[in-house]
Amino acid sequence: MNVFEEVKKALCKASAGLDESKVVSGALLKDDLDIDSLDLVEVAMTLEDTFNLTLPEDEMENIRTVGDIVSVIEARLKVQSA
Amino acid sequence: MLNRVVVTGYGAVTPLGLNVDDTWRNLVAGVSGVGYISLFDATDFKVKIAAEVKDFDPAAHLDPTAARRNDRFAQFALVAGIQAIDAAGLKVDDANRYDIGVLIGSGVGGLDSLTQQLDVLKTRGPTRVSPFLVPMMIADSASSQVSIKMGIMGANFGLISACATGTDALGIAYKMIKWGEIKAMVAGGADAAVTPVGFAGFTQAGALSRNNEPQKASRPFDMERDGFVVGEGAAVLVLENLDYARSRGASIIAEIVGYGATSDAFHITQPLENGEAAAKAIELALAGVDCKKVGYINAHGTSTPLNDASETKAIKKAFGDRAYKIPISSAKSMLGHMMGAAGAIEAVVCCKVINEGIIPPTVNLEHPDPECDLDYVPNVARDGDVRIAISNSFGFGGHNSVIAIGRYDGQ
């Protein structure tokens, strides 16, 4: 599964009307995509279901960009497969 | 100095239309908004009918996020609130945003969101409960969402008094303006209680009509009435300080001339049988006006055996022999009981009666009850020249709330 594509899907699901072309790795969730803290919880829940993993709250708190989400998931996937 | 308070706009989402004009046209025509429940599977329920808002597509009225992130009751409130503000021609800007407030009450708030997430909690555990549960469930979200959408920064809160909520919201908004605390209030009520748990609860409490012939079930003041029909929707009015309304050239619909509220201090669901406290609320609402000018009463008229009899007694107590000469009608005979929104839509009806000179009927009044022997405008609308109208609202908890609305005399 392509992690970035799944993150993009989750963001678009959480924020109806989000312009997909704006969802790039460096995009700031709050300033560029208007994703607030509540939206982010929903995004995390969707991704946890998609990848069947648990995203640690402390790591989610530091997330600022789309790429940050991708990194956290990739790191968890590595831990799980190890 | 006390200020005069006027109505300058209104909006509504009801079982008879997605705006005030359609709702009014259907009320005058005696159309019933009651039908079989479509919002959930009522197969196992004793009561299978409700007055649902039909063909309401939130995405057609609201931006996608607002449509998805609001419970149905708050969606109704947003749509009705925006209609009201538009109709009032009230432009919210930096010069006035702190002079305007919002007070849209709700009887049960986001009951559907709460029960859906309760299912999630039980089946999938606490980490799967939506972060939007609380913002969607809280009853004050109706007011807050209107404030956020319109940039209104004055007082913003909710208010709960069960089926009297809409009238109390208007009454408190009226007092805030009268006392000079604020220039304008966007006020009303909203509810969406056609949910399985809500229905089960009301049914178990014995409050609902068991008549499964939808259009005949809500029959206020009729001998064969056996309970109310749950309705849903929202109605919102813009109330303003008269001077403020004039200064901005607003067109004035009617004037709020009084508000009274009392408590039965008796029982959580039953009204006080002799109507004493309800009569007192009517008297308080009319304290500042000539009660001989009252030409229409929009009854609470729920179609429960107890309410309609005790309300009749209350009206007689308040008006004496003149009670027999005042046309009374129950919009709930057609709209069902819109719960927290009922008082607000019924205030809109009073404004319409005053301005249009037409009194909508009480439908299904086929077998008069000797205990209910006033003029309930049975089945067919009638012309009427009404100077002052009152709207009665009573609620579980013993709330008796009455608002008095007068024709604006242009001075």
Image (cartoon, coloured by chain):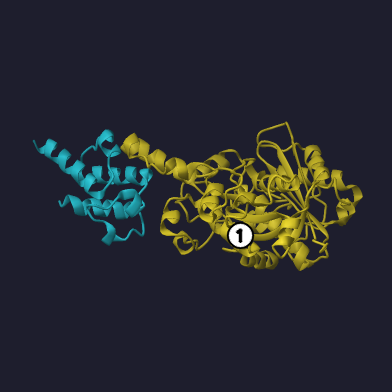
- The residue that appears at 20% across and 54% down in the rendered structure is A5
Between residue A6 and residue B303, name the one nearer to us: A6
- The residue that appears at 47% across and 54% down in the rendered structure is B39
Where does the image place residue B314, in percent across and percent down from the top left? 81, 43
Element under disc 1:
helix
Specify the subunit that label 1 lies on: B
The yellow chain is B
The cyan chain is A
- Quick one: which residue is furthest to the left in this view? A82
Q: What residue type is labelled 1?
A: Ile
| Residue B192 visible to an observer of this rendering | no
Residue at which label 1 appears? B85
Toward which corner of the image does residue B239 lie, by quadrant? bottom right
B95 versus B279 height, above or below: below
Where does the image place residue B145, in percent across and percent down from the top left? 52, 50
Where does the image place residue B407, in percent across and percent down from the top left? 80, 61
Left or right: residue B141 compared with residue A58: right
| Residue B147 visible to an observer of this rendering | yes
Q: Residues within 10 Å of mark 1 (few under 14, many from 20)?
A: many
The quadrant of the rendering that contains the C terminus of chain B is: bottom right
Left or right: residue A33 compared with residue B346: left
Left or right: residue B97 compared with residue B363: left
